[in-house]
Amino acid sequence: MENTRTFKDKILLIVKGLAMGAANKVPGVSGGVVAFVAGFYEEFIYSLQRINGQAFKLLFKGRFKSFATYINGRFLGLLILGMLISYFSVSKVLDYFIQHYKLFVWSAFFGMILGSIYYIGKDFRNWNRRTVIGLLVGAGVGIVISLMNPAKENDHLGFVFICGIISVSGMTLPGLSGSFILILLGNYVLLLVDSVNALFDTIAEMFKGDFAFMSNAERIRELQVLGVFTAGSAVGLVTLSHLLNYVLKHFKHVTTAIIIGFISGSLGVVWPWKEEVYKMDALGNKLLDSNGREVIENYKRFTPDISSGETWIAFIFILFGITIVLALDWYGKRTKNI
């Protein structure tokens, strides 16, 4: 019975990693929210901050078992495995649905964010002057970020490394969408679509015995970009976890209030009823990026038409998103009582 439960727990950790990876790839949605709502956020941050000097001493001395135990390796390993699988499976499915059923996907995400705000705020009882100010500051920052215009794509490796550090914030800080930050920096498509697809295609070709990609300068460049981005993400994941661990330990209530405000202020990012505003040249033609895609300048949000059947279906998906979060909350409480 214990072995079955242990195996089940391993599978559930991989599934949680899948959810975190998929959420972190969607603009406006934070993988950290998944960790927060599913009840393993503090263990996640604690495990990451254990990757420190002591851990590397154990590693360099060849004490691999002690190293894995020290950093909670089984937990981190299974979670990260789920995230990696997500980038080549769940994320591709999400990309398809966003392209073909955009309104309903954004509606579900909007509902999940609403549910997350309820989940984080329902048991928070520490309202005072400092936490209210934190709430307002978080909301203000979220609103400002949601209204910012995206920058141009930049594949300079130094900038890509910085993007990696910044983008992983969505994994460690609930409410801050790393993928949306990448949109603002102009590198979302380059780092989370083109480079990931390049790696996927390269692995598929290698399995077929085809190594022609080695003479493809564009493919090699995309793989270099992905490698540097991954390195930046790893550095950011560890360094931010140490910072957050300190902040949560010494300023937990204010930090929670800021998170609630930030998530609330960022709701405009995932507002389902919006259309893209494209960058135009002097002649009124849409500008294209280096890969021939139309460049989005901003989003124009509008009020839904309640006489439309599509709008009511979108409302159902909002309720569905809220239900997902409430179900995670219920499951978290159930597992704690077992």
Image (spheres, helix red, strand yellow):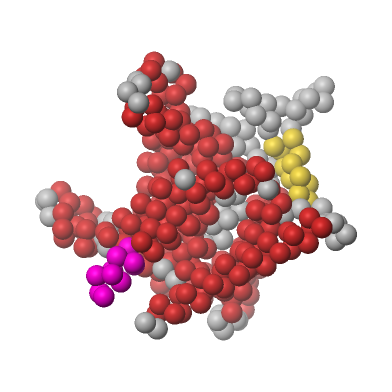
Pick out the residue farthest to the right: 307
Pick out the residue farthest to the top: 215
Task: Give the image location of residue 271, x and y in percent.
Answer: 71, 56
**Does the magenta portion include 210?**
no
Position of 213 relative to 317 (above/below): above
- Please count the marks in the image: 0
Q: Residue at x 39, y 64 (%)?
A: 12
User: Image quadrant for the C terminus?
Assistant: bottom left
Q: Viewer-proximal residue, 188 or 89?
A: 89
Q: Residue at x 56, y 40 (%)?
A: 188
To which quarter of the image does residue 176 belong?
bottom right
Q: Residue at x 45, y 43 (%)?
A: 88
Task: Give the image location of residue 84, x and y in percent.
Answer: 40, 47
Position of 61 relative to 116 (above/below): above
Q: Residue at x 41, y 72 (%)?
A: 249
Position of 59 relative to 251 (above/below): above
Q: Can residue 64 be seen from the camera position used here?
A: yes
Q: Viewer-proximal residue, 258 or 225?
A: 225
Q: Can residue 261 be seen from the camera position used here?
A: no
User: Image quadrant for the N terminus?
Assistant: bottom left
To which quarter of the image does residue 213 belong?
top left
**Does the magenta portion include 4?**
yes
Q: Viewer-proximal residue, 146 or 191?
A: 191
For the stretch drawn in magenta, the main secondary structure is helix
To which quarter of the image does residue 244 belong?
bottom left
Task: Give the image location of residue 111, x and y in percent.
Answer: 65, 64
Q: Viewer-proximal residue, 78 or 313?
A: 313
Q: Is residue 186 left or right of residue 312?
A: left
Q: Is residue 213 left or right of residue 186?
A: left
Task: Give the image location of residue 138, x and y in percent.
Answer: 61, 64
Q: Which residues are magenta?
A: 1-10
